[in-house]
Amino acid sequence: MTTQTQTQAQANTDFYSVLKDRRSVRHYDPNFKIPQEEIQEILELATKAPSSSNTQSWRFLVVTDQELKKQLLPIANNQQQVVDSSAVIVILGDLEMYKKSEHINQLAVDAGYMAAEFAKQFTENSVKLYSSLPKERLHEVAVFDSGLVAMQIMLIAKAKGYDTVPMGGYDREKLKQFFNIPAHLAPTIILPIGKAAVEGRPTSRLPISEITSWNKI
Amino acid sequence: MTTQTQTQAQANTDFYSVLKDRRSVRHYDPNFKIPQEEIQEILELATKAPSSSNTQSWRFLVVTDQELKKQLLPIANNQQQVVDSSAVIVILGDLEMYKKSEHINQLAVDAGYMAAEFAKQFTENSVKLYSSLPKERLHEVAVFDSGLVAMQIMLIAKAKGYDTVPMGGYDREKLKQFFNIPAHLAPTIILPIGKAAVEGRPTSRLPISEITSWNKI
């Protein structure tokens, strides 16, 4: 990240400020573009999130091309943020995530994090388990892990002085057709990221006592 | 949080340190108990996460009773962390989340965040939309939003000097039976939280270039 960007985007590294200040932002400065390297850096940091057996089922399709973003508009219920934000990150869940287990565990062996014998066994177990799961359960794993990485992206963006808005309201079938997304990649949310033009509105939360129970339902 | 707890638990409020230092921890100090008030504070902060139409479908069943935690052991594939951690947070997704929309939007009106007329319309639209969604789609919404709040819990815990381990590997049916969980609450993960006895192992991540594409799949 350049010093210029830091100044422009009001970076903040206090954990609690980042957490409390993050809000969904729906109005972006259309003239501000986050450099591709910085988006890459945000995604890289975000993938430090945990995942089911470290399968890392998240995949990212980042839309920065202005013409494509305009074409996304009708797919995304005409919500202008897909055009005005710097980029739209389409988060996809790979339902064949276990196919990368061997590769992931080999990376851990190469880094000295895992013994080769353990990696072999762990890969075998993961592939056996995940390849036998019903599609709905694989989908659930991928969707949940997408949520983990999405939250990290939103917080990291905020720490860098940017904003985001997680969007579930878009036409999944049209999006899949538009980008020719293969069947094993399930889109979860689309996530515009950019420089806010108008601050996000404050919103209310349910009192924690209403949604928490202790030791019994 | 008391000063004593801060000292014991090595609180850290640098955003990037929290993010980079968080790892899944599987060995906990069985003698250390996080005060209930602090767990409540962590959950309250975590629910600042966004959610689909702000429906906040997350529900928490926090297990602190030592006898119950022992009984969780066979349900959780005999993973000792459910016994040794301070608490096990069962994260549930409420598939009837829209039933709280009116209440949530009224809270926003009372706080001066939303005009009464807008709240009425927003509630009507949400109830109409969500109550007509197929159960699988409601499940997807609840699971994704569970992921968002789970990530925040894990990060806040780390900022306070605690650790966590998200567990998807447990017997869902047995858990539902054991706690008599009603059908509209879907368990996503169980999340032990406590004071680490042994640090988490480092793990590898896929290079970001392998999982990211730009403007096309």
Image (cartoon, coloured by chain):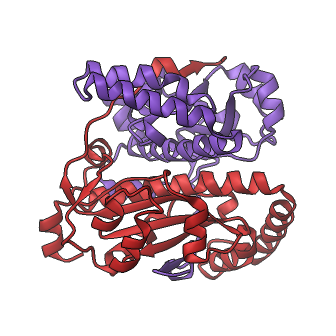
Chain colours: A purple, B red
Front in this rendered view, residue A95 or B153:
A95
Q: Position of residue A63 (x, y in %)?
A: 63, 25
A87 vs B162: above or below: above
Residue B72, quarter of the rendered image: bottom left
Front in this rendered view, residue A196 or B199:
B199
B80 vs A33: above or below: below
- Please give the count of numbered marks on the rendered protein: 0
Give the residue at x 61% y 77%: B180
Give the residue at x 48% y 62%: B75
A128 vs B2: above or below: above
Q: Is residue B150 left or right of residue B114?
A: left
Q: Pick the quarter of the image with the N terminus of chain B.
A: bottom left
Residue B187 in sight in this render:
no
Residue B69, quarter of the rendered image: bottom left
Q: Pick the quarter of the image with the C terminus of chain B.
A: top right
Give the residue at x 28% y 49%: B18
Give the residue at x 30% y 45%: B23
Q: Position of residue B82 (x, y in %)?
A: 36, 64
Q: Position of residue B98 (x, y in %)?
A: 75, 69
Residue B67 in sight in this render:
yes
Q: Is residue B122 left or right of residue A126?
A: right
Q: Is residue A82 left or right of residue B35?
A: right
Q: Position of residue B136 (x, y in %)?
A: 77, 52
